[in-house]
Image (cartoon, helix red, strand yellow):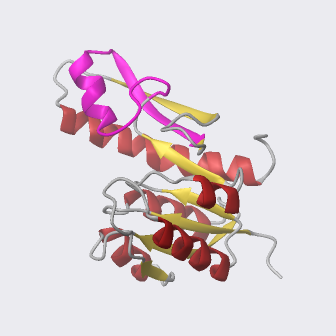
Amino acid sequence: MSDKIKLAVLGSGKGSNLVSLAEACAAGMLPADIVLVASDVADAGILERAAGFGLSARFIEPGKFRTKLDETAEAAYVAALRESGAEWVALAGFMRILKGDFLRAFEKKVVNIHPSLLPAFPGLEAWKQAHDYGVKATGCTVHMVDHGIDTGSILAQGVVPVLEDDTAATLHQRIQQEEHTLYPRTLARLFNGEIRV
């Protein structure tokens, strides 16, 4: 019996954070087994990347809303996660808001990474918000997911300086590089009991 945490990853995009988590698991740096990768986008890159690591990957219909899961979809996600044996859920660019039933099913077990230093710049395209605002530094935040938008307890943050010649795109790339080290490291500390929620 593995003493590793059973982790599910939800994402909507290319899946670069999934790659960093899967590599950290393989290297023994992150004491977890990724038991399911699920996406609300049928042709999302994250599913392809999951398959490349030999991980179980599924598209699960998100339902009729654009920014959140409808009730039927939420139940399908919870059922798939329970079936996989997942104990924790890591969001990796999952573009839908998770609500009551989902968060109750995995109470205090859902973690997200957000591309800004929360509470600054919550919501979409945070790197662009930061760039447009003219801040001198931004970064990324690993936080617990609660019923608000990017409002849960902060577990760790990584600072990324904004350079004179940065565009929103170059800034986003550097924030993502920071995410790829911060996310696996923070989850490892969380699962090892170094960080208390």
Horizontal and vertical percent for residue 127?
Answer: 30, 33
- Is residue 139 part of the magenta span, yes or no? yes
Identify the residue at horizontal 63%, vertical 55% (top origin). 103
In this rendering, position of residue 78 left or right of residue 125: right
Horizontal and vertical percent for residue 20?
Answer: 47, 59
Identify the residue at horizontal 53%, vertical 38% (top origin). 148
Identify the residue at horizontal 53%, vertical 43% (top origin). 182
Quarter location, residue 120: top left
- Please say whether residue 106 is visible from this viewpoint: no
- Please say whether residue 67 is visible from this viewpoint: yes
Horizontal and vertical percent for residue 112?
Answer: 53, 48
Quarter location, residue 125: top left
- Which quadrant holds the C terminus? top right
Q: Is residue 162 above or below residue 193?
A: above
In this rendering, position of residue 110 left or right of residue 50: right
Please give the range of residues in magenta: 117-143
Q: Is residue 34 above or below residue 156?
A: below
Q: Is residue 121 above or below residue 27?
A: above
Identify the residue at horizontal 31%, vertical 70% (top origin). 41
Quarter location, residue 85: bottom right
Horizontal and vertical percent for residue 6?
Answer: 69, 70
